[in-house]
Image (cartoon, rainbow, N blue to C red):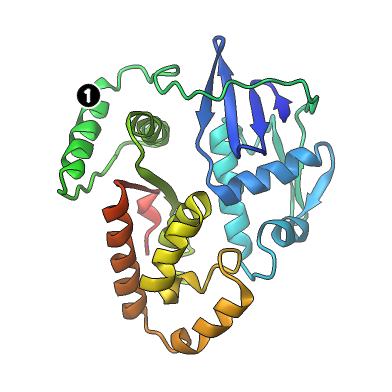
Amino acid sequence: MYRFSPFTLDPANQCLLRQFRGKETRIHLPPKAFSVLQMLVEHAGSLVAHNELMERVWPDTFVQPEVLSSHVRDIRAALGDNARKPRFIETASRKGYRFIATVDSSEILAAQQTLDASSNPLVGRDSEFAKLHQCYRAALTGRRQLVFVTGEPGMGKTALCREFLLRASSAGSPYTAWGQCIEGYGVQEPYFPVLKVIGELCGADGGALIQVFKTKAPTCIVQFSDLISREERAALDSDVRAATSGRVLREVLDALESVGALQPLLVVLEDLQWVD
């Protein structure tokens, strides 16, 4: 494990922990973002080039540079880091990133693995949490819910949603995933936030959900080279090569219906103001 105060990175259990007032809280990070952070931490103090990160995290896959930038933003948000005055991740313009915090990789580091969702409560958000939990309880009875969390920049909307996912997870076993909308990116890949959600779901749960998307949404799963083999991708390619955007949408919705039938499904789509 790797310790960079007040955080501990545990690659074996794929989790990021934050110590606060003697307790440790699990910090939510999508699988790809976790892989980016792990590589940066493993090479702490050294510049890691963009192409090295892309080859490590997305092998045999072409992805736009904006995707890597999005994951770095996720990491900074999780760490509470500021790109202009970084304490953890420093940007080398047009070159790559450098992890600048002191890292202790001693094997004797210990981390509490139990999630305590109430260990880092948000002050003055009881009403918002009550509304979110009310909607979640309705969803558990089979009534779909759509919630908009709105407000001025810096009000803590992201922190509210992250804490809610932690609390919901501690109270049951829902599928949870986080999608990020990026300014100016929708024209090139209109389903990017949803694809990010699907990649996170399949990466976290493994075979069961991958099989759902293979069956229900081949036009979607074929885009994830790290989730299916080359042989499977080649077999699907002829069927999906001429697929329309309408078919992609229908298949994704069908697949998510099937996922929600297995377990409750909570999806957060952040920064909807950037939706094309």
Q: Is residue 253 above or below residue 244?
A: above
Is 83 left, or right, of 275 in this rendering? right
Q: Is residue 153 above or below residue 203?
A: above
At x 56%, y 52%, the residue is 70
Q: Position of residue 247 (x, y in %)?
A: 33, 79
Q: Nearer the viewer, residue 211 or 116?
A: 211
Quadrant for the C terminus, please. Answer: bottom left
Where, by quadrant of the figure, is residue 231 drawn? bottom right
Is 225 left, or right, of 117 in this rendering? right
What kind of residue is marked 1? Ser
Q: What residue is pinned by disc 1?
A: 127
Where, by quadrant of the figure, is residue 133 drawn? top left
Label 1 sits on a secondary structure element that is: helix
Q: Residues within 10 Å of mark 1 (few under 14, many from 20)?
A: few
Q: Residue pushed farthest right?
A: 46
Q: Position of residue 91 (x, y in %)?
A: 72, 45
Q: Is residue 22 above or below residue 235?
A: above
Q: Residue pushed farthest top?
A: 21
Q: Is residue 202 above or below residue 175?
A: below
Q: Is residue 191 visible?
A: no
Q: Position of residue 32 (x, y in %)?
A: 59, 51
Q: Nearer the viewer, residue 163 or 239?
A: 239
At x 19%, y 50%, the residue is 144
Quadrant for the N terminus, please. Answer: top right
Q: Is residue 204 visible?
A: yes
At x 44%, y 89%, the residue is 242
Is 126 left, or right, of 269 in this rendering? left
Where, by quadrant of the figure, is residue 248 drawn? bottom left
For the image, the number of numbered tags is: 1
At x 69%, y 29%, the residue is 87
Is 247 left, or right, of 84 in this rendering? left
